[in-house]
Every structure is written in C-alpha cells, then in structure tokens.
Amino acid sequence: MEKKYPLPPFTMETALEKVQMAENAWNTKDPEKVCMAYTLDTEWRNRTEFINGREEVKAFLIRKWQKELDYKLKKELWGFRENRMAVRFEYEWRDASGQWYRSYGNENWEFDENGLMRKRYASINDLTIKESERKL
C-alpha cells in the first residue's frame, strides 16, 4: 500500500509540512506527480466541477495548466484536526491573451490512514490584475 508521509493524525509540525509539500508539488505543474498525492477514489469539488478518482484529477490538472499559464501558488495552513485540514491559498496565472489573474480560495482536505488525500473541496475566486500587480 502506498503511503504519503507525513501520516495523520497531524501535529502542527506535520500539518505545516503536508501543506508545504502540496504547495511544492502543485508548483511543479506536473499532473502525474501531483495526482499521486490523492487516493484512487478521491473526491473533489473544484469551483463548480466535481471530480472523482485519481485519473479524473490528472485530466483536470492537465486542462488546468494548459489554460493557467505561468502558474505560481502559495498555500497557508488555516487549521487542522486529526486527519483533516483547512488551507487558504492564492495563485497567479495568465491566460493565452496575456491577461493576469490572482485566484484566492479555501480548501478543506481529508486524508486516509496512508496520508493520501481522500477529499478536497475548493472554493475559488478570480481577480483580474495587471502584470505590475503580481506578488508571487
């Protein structure tokens, strides 16, 4: 059985480590690498899209990073308990026309006993920005 350390139940130290690992992975923009952090039967809600299973996650990420160019993400632990976490994030990206965006949101995560994410629920809002307003 595959394990993704650190494992729950989380401490402050291991929760912060898990969030940093997620940030690092997503910033690679490698769908194959990122999807391996999720269970085979993972459940997601991303904005208004419902995604089920690791293969659908991979397909979603491929589409995402084809659209969201020059993507850069920052995550922050908001809270945790046992095998669950709340995370806030912001990321910046541009579309094919060159328009820049900053996307803000919150995620609720639930992990299985092997440290793989079983559930991810994300609420996200986009803000149009000028390139000179970029922070990340």
Image (cartoon, rainbow, N blue to C red):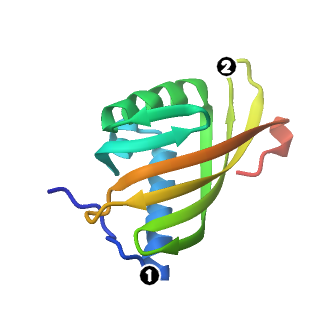
In the picture, the quarter occupied by the N terminus is bottom left
Residue at 76 percent of width and 51 percent of height: 135
In the image, which disc is placed on residue 96?
A: 2
Residue at 32 percent of width and 56 percent of height: 116
In the image, which disc is placed on residue 122?
A: none
Q: How many marks?
A: 2
Tell me the element at label 2: loop
| N-terminal-most mark, 1 or 2 | 1
The amino acid sitting under disc 2 is Ala
The reply, left or right, for residue 73 in relation to residue 116 is right
Q: Position of residue 3 (x, y in %)?
A: 23, 61
- Label 1 neighbourhood size at 10 Å, few (<14), some (14-19), many (20+)? some
Q: Position of residue 113 (x, y in %)?
A: 27, 66
Q: Quadrant of residue 42?
A: top left
Whether pointer 1 and pointer 2 mark residues with C-beta atoms closer than 8 Å, the reply is no
Q: Quadrant of residue 52?
A: top left
Residue at 47 percent of width and 72 percent of height: 15
The reply, left or right, for residue 44 in relation to residue 47 is left
Tell me the element at label 1: loop
The amino acid sitting under disc 1 is Thr
- Residue that sits furthest to the top in the current view: 97
Front disc: 1 or 2: 1
User: Mark 1 = which residue?
Assistant: 11
Q: Position of residue 29 (x, y in %)?
A: 47, 39
Tell me: residue 117, above or below residue 85: above
Q: CA distance from mark 1 to mark 2?
A: 41 Å
- Label 2 neighbourhood size at 10 Å, few (<14), some (14-19), many (20+)? few
Q: Position of residue 103 (x, y in %)?
A: 71, 42
